[in-house]
């Protein structure tokens, strides 16, 4: 029996506001427990919430960036459930009237593009954080995160594989970071995801029973958890059982999920309009003023890189993964005329270095200025591409400018054709058999001669000049 997977994601993005959504407490991460709290976010009797206008502005901005319709009048609701990290006994969220809905994002997976629908984006407050003591049967609660503003982005069940889910999540992550409304730090919980996964026999229209995978905080965990859940559900059905609708927790150390609780439906939360908060009315002027502030988004930037810099679409996609990456590239291109040369070095040497050291483009040990200077040395013929790799490694280790490294180590490329010609003549006279082989038709042996010249010059001879003189001598 063949099965089709159906996936929908609920993503929580923490907004980069200075204060919480309904009070003036700080949203700064890492403060001592329960120091960023007040009677409002702790739900003390008689306290009234006051909406942070910037959260509304960010919601409109994200709605426009994801092709959503902005709701002219939306309102907050109380989502009732009882858990130690929720001091009020309810969460202020949005239910029947979210601030934006009916949007979409385009993903690109191995050259195959697909539109993923967005059901809604709504505002809500975050809950606190439970800290479980590893040595004692005790749990502690930190309410610093309580009331931190979130946008929840709910997708349509349009994804059919873990890879599609990963591509959607990465694209959404890029968008919120391009907009500057969320730092996207998944380790700190600023960008996290719940995945709803079900399977159904191929050809069946009705969805299967779904399970929810809760609080996934890395792209890799999302994909692994979904793959595990797909196989788990297949095994249940093929063994004659039935999938139970439930919420499950992913354990990345054991690469498996465990049941947490039965899955709640909307009526379990007993939603009702929050009586302490007025409806939010958004006029056309606010929407159009926000639209005018939209930055160039990943897809637009990718298309511009293809047309303006004549890059392959794959290169452009990689270089626009983040706004910082794209800015780094354009800073280099201002100083280096060959955009493809910049792209090649960023995608191979630079990204290889960052991945090996677990760093991002923002924490790169090599600045865009230094990389541009290195590539200028290649363009001018001062050093060869091979020598440039040695210089690049030295730059990463020492932080020195490329020009200084080249000067200190005497790495300037030999471009004097008479000097190179003299070296080549010596090599040809010492390898008469190889010369005869070349002239007898084994032209591929020219690589042997190039290697000998490079060895004699310690890699400093200009390869183009070497090849030109070799051909003249061998074919003359």
Image: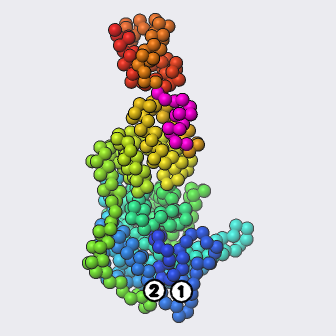
Q: Nearer the viewer, residue 471 or 181?
A: 471
Q: Residue at x 51, y 69 (%)?
A: 247
Residue 70 appears in the figure? yes
Q: Position of residue 373 (x, y in %)?
A: 45, 41
Circle 1 packing at 10 Å, graded few (<14), some (14-19), many (20+), is some
Magenta stretch encompasses residue 218: no
Q: Residue at x 44, y 18 (%)?
A: 420
Q: Residue furthest right?
A: 135
| Residue pointed to by mark 1 | 40
Question: Label for residue 50?
Answer: 2
Dot 2: element: loop
| Vertical side of 138 occupied by 395: above or below | above
**Image quadrant where one finds the C terminus:** top left
Q: Residue at x 28, y 48 (%)?
A: 308
Residue 444 appears in the figure? no
Q: Nearer the viewer, residue 122 or 326?
A: 326
Magenta stretch encompasses residue 406: yes
Q: Position of residue 335 (x, y in %)?
A: 38, 44
Circle 2 packing at 10 Å, graded few (<14), some (14-19), many (20+), is some
Q: Pointer 1 and pointer 2: residues touching (CB < 8 Å)?
A: yes
Q: Position of residue 372 (x, y in %)?
A: 43, 43
Q: Earlier in the sequence, mark 1 or mark 2?
A: 1
Q: Nearer the viewer, residue 134 or 278?
A: 278
| Vertical side of 268 occupied by 179: above or below | above
Q: Which residues are magenta?
A: 400-413
Number of callouts: 2
Q: Position of residue 66 (x, y in %)?
A: 33, 65
């Amino acid at each position: 029996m063949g099965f089709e997977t159906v996936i929908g994601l609920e993503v929580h993005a923490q907004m980069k506001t200075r204060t919480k959504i309904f009070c003036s407490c700080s949203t700064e991460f890492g403060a001592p427990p329960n120091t960023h709290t007040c009677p409002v976010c702790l739900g003390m009797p008689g306290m009234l919430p006051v909406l942070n206008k910037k959260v509304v502005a960010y919601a409109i901005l994200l709605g426009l960036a994801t092709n959503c319709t902005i709701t002219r009048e939306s309102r907050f609701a109380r989502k009732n459930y009882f858990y130690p990290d929720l001091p009020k006994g309810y969460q202020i969220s949005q239910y029947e009237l979210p601030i934006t809905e009916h949007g979409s994002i385009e993903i690109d997976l191995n050259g195959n593009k697909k539109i993923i629908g967005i059901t809604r984006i709504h505002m809500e407050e975050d809950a606190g954080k439970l800290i479980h003591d590893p040595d004692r049967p005790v749990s502690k609660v930190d309410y610093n995160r309580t009331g931190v503003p979130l946008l929840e982005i709910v997708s349509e069940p349009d994804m059919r594989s873990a890879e599609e889910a990963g591509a959607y999540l990465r694209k959404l992550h890029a968008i919120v970071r391009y907009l500057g409304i969320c730092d996207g730090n998944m380790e700190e919980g600023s960008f996290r995801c719940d995945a709803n996964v079900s399977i159904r026999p191929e050809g069946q229209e009705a969805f299967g029973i779904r399970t929810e995978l809760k609080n996934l905080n890395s792209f890799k965990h999302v994909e692994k958890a979904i793959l595990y859940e797909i196989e788990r559900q297949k095994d249940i059905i093929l063994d004659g059982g039935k999938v139970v609708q439930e919420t499950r927790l992913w354990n990345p150390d054991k690469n498996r999920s465990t049941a947490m609780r039965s899955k709640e439906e909307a009526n379990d939360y007993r939603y009702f309009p929050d009586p302490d908060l007025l409806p939010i009315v958004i006029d056309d002027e606010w929407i159009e003023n926000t639209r005018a502030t939209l930055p160039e988004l990943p897809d637009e930037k990718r298309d511009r890189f293809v047309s303006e810099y004549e890059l392959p679409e794959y290169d452009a996609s990689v270089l626009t993964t983040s706004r910082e990456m794209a800015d780094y590239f354009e800073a280099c291109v201002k100083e280096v005329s060959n955009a493809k040369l910049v792209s090649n070095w960023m995608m191979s040497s630079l990204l290889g270095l960052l991945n090996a050291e677990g760093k991002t483009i923002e924490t790169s040990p090599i600045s865009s200025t230094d990389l541009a200077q290195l590539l200028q040395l290649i363009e001018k013929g001062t050093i060869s591409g091979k020598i440039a790799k040695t210089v690049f490694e030295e730059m990463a280790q020492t932080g020195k400018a490329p020009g200084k490294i080249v000067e200190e180590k005497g790495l300037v490329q030999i471009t004097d054709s008479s000097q190179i010609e003299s070296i080549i003549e010596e090599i040809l006279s010492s390898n008469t058999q190889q010369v005869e082989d070349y002239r007898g038709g084994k032209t591929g042996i020219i690589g042997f001669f190039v290697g000998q010249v490079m060895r004699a010059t310690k890699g400093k001879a200009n390869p183009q000049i070497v090849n030109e003189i070799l051909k003249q001598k061998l074919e003359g």
